[in-house]
Amino acid sequence: AAKDSGKATWVRYEPRMRQDMTEHARIAGELRHAIDHGQLRLVHQPIFDLHTGRIHGAEALARWQHPDRGLVSPACFIPIAERSGLIVPIGAWVLREACTTLARWRREHPGTAIQAINVNVAVRQLREAGFADLVADTLEQTGLGPENLILEITESAVVDGPHVQEALVRLHRMGIRLALDDFGTGQSSLSLLRAFPVDIIKLDKSFVDGTDRGRHAIAAAVSQLAGNLGLKAVAEGIEAEDQLDRLREMNFHYGQGYLLARPMSADECGALMAKPAQALSA
Ligand code: C2E
Ligand code: MG
Ligand code: MG
Ligand code: MG
């Protein structure tokens, strides 16, 4: 009976799955068009120094300005871009755009404390043989140095295989910093920290906004671990004052979240960094 019902479920879901696949293929087609027709945008979320309250950096986040559907979130198109391989040209565009923006900020606001821009990189990009060269060329062409770029990778990249590992080691030797994104949500996190040239840990939002003490205990342990390993720790997704207070007590260096600042246009972010010390409370 169990087998029968399992089969029945499969039959019932099959048309839907097919529909999803068609949908994905359609979106991938539109995405290809979007790249060539300038429909991709970047927004920038400031990263704050939690001790001084000053803006410290910014993370570049992709958006798709779709002609009919409006602003599409990366959660909708990045996974499709990864599966279709379109993340390779999209990622190259994101990298160039982010570096161009940082170079402009640093020209327009010479005293800015923002030294580096954070750019998310998908595993698929790191598997490309020419990725490290692409990064080096982009930095050179935009007039930036390796200290001006932080690449955010996930734990899945680090465990992908020797080729990706080599790429990460090479990028790190070039002087580019690597941040482990969504830390705590993947697997084998702790051994990765020893085996890879990670500079920054970004604690996942789920450990910031969780209400149970277990999650808070993990957040505190991550901060301490980062300190002991000589890494910087960033807390992601700070939405409330009590979260901010707790993270400061836990000695997180840096923080990012809607409470502090939402992702914004390059001009808005530039205006923010031109201001003197920001008060951290909203
Ligand atoms: P991520 O790299 O972990 O980025 C953080 C996400 O959390 C962003 O969502 C940001 O807008 C959101 N966020 C920040 N503060 C808060 C908060 O206080 N509350 C809540 N609820 N959310 C907050 P976004 O921009 O929608 O991006 C989602 C994910 O898409 C990113 O997660 C990243 O994995 C991926 N992504 C975005 N842009 C790119 C890109 O250029 N390349 C690649 N490969 N992935 C990207
Ligand atoms: Mg990120
Ligand atoms: Mg993250
Ligand atoms: Mg995340």
Image (cartoon, rainbow, N blue to C red):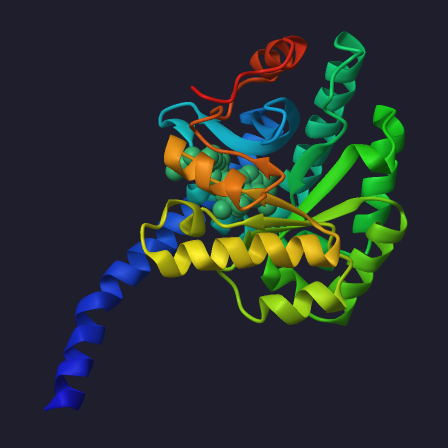
Q: Quadrant of the C terminus?
A: top left
When the figure is inspected, residue 81 is found, relative to residue 113, above or below; the finding is below
Q: Seen from this angle, which residue lies furthest front?
A: 249
**Residue 30 appears in the figure:** no
The answer to whether residue 133 is left or right of residue 12 is right
The answer to whether residue 272 is left or right of residue 80 is right
Closer to the camera in the image, 108 or 20: 108
When the figure is inspected, residue 193 is found, relative to residue 24, above or below; the finding is below
Closer to the camera in the image, 145 or 184: 184
When the figure is inspected, residue 177 is found, relative to residue 59, above or below; the finding is below
The image quadrant of residue 15 is bottom left
When the figure is inspected, residue 39 is found, relative to residue 181, above or below; the finding is above
Q: Quadrant of the N terminus?
A: bottom left
Residue pictured at 76% horizontal, 64% vertical: 165
The answer to whether residue 239 is left or right of residue 51 is left
Residue pictured at 74% horizontal, 50% vertical: 199
**Residue 10 appears in the figure:** yes
Q: Residue 123 in the image: state x and y as whole percent.
A: 64, 57
Q: Residue 95 in the image: state x and y as whole percent.
A: 71, 35
Residue pictured at 49% horizontal, 30% vertical: 64
Residue pictured at 83% horizontal, 59% vertical: 169
Q: Residue 119 in the image: state x and y as whole percent.
A: 66, 38
